[in-house]
Image: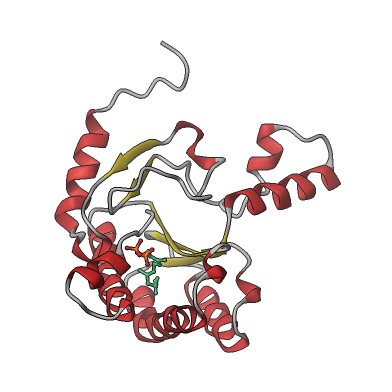
Amino acid sequence: MIMDGNGRWAKKRLLPRALGHKRGVETVREIVRAARSMGLEALTLYAFSSENWRRPADEISDLMGLLRHFIKSDLEEFVANNVRLKILGEYHALAPDICELIDTALARTAHNTGTTLAIALNYGAQQEIARAAQAAAAKGPITPESITDELDTWDMPPLDLLIRTSGELRLSNFMLWQAAYAELWFTDVLWPDFTPEHLREALNQFGKRERRYGGR
Ligand code: FPP
């Protein structure tokens, strides 16, 4: 999921952008619970892109603060509900205390067998593909399969459905390789207004699509 529209949600209400992001985290919590109860095998959330460093320092700091708080406050819920946490992207470039929180959360949920919650942090798909190609080349021939095996998503199921909120029709450097045969679903709903009902609607439509993977 490309969670877009927090800024516009806040602007429409004459609120600071930070409050839009804060509401965005509440949506994250609801959507993770919904994904779990619907039995989704994996849910990936684009929380911070490698390009988001271009945002003003105070906004970056707000987002990092929310991330810190989210991991601290929600880890026990993941542990209790068999959620396996995973991070896509080069998260070691984040603040050392956040890396520590992440490493603890990864270790505590590593053996969980329920929904995998992947959070993309300092993530860019082109960077991910370049890293994967380099790792694949170090081991042998570069093939689509050998690259796939080195992506950050190497231990996740194939991407079936990619959702973007807020009306923008772009992939913005998110899971470009994995999206090769994914179904795309766009909605005008802004991320803070996105509900489990919207997720259900997207999944229903997904269920009706005929996927041919290039065949016929
Ligand atoms: C897009 O809104 C959203 C983001 C850049 C970040 C998404 C982050 C969160 C929902 C909160 C942090 C996440 C976690 C998992 C703790 P935008 O600011 O680009 O909105 P706009 O396009 O309307 O300005």
What residue is at 29 percent from the left and 43 percent from the top?
186
Is 152 drawn above or below residue 30 in the view shown?
Answer: above
What residue is at 30 percent from the left and 41 percent from the top?
185
Is 37 drawn above or below residue 146 in the view shown?
Answer: below
Q: Is residue 55 left or right of residue 74?
A: right
Q: Is residue 85 left or right of residue 169?
A: right
Q: Closest to the observer: 206 or 82?
A: 206
Q: Closest to the observer: 166 or 48?
A: 166
Q: Is residue 189 left or right of residue 84?
A: left
Locate residue 109, reporting x and y percent: 47, 72
Is 68 drawn above or below residue 150 in the view shown?
Answer: below
Locate residue 103, reporting x and y percent: 57, 78
Q: Quadrant of the C terminus?
A: top left
Q: Quadrant of ligand 1?
A: bottom left
- Can see residue 154? no
Task: Tell me where residue 139 sits by quadrant.
Answer: top right
Task: Tell me where residue 63 sits by quadrant.
Answer: bottom left
Locate residue 129, reporting x and y percent: 66, 47
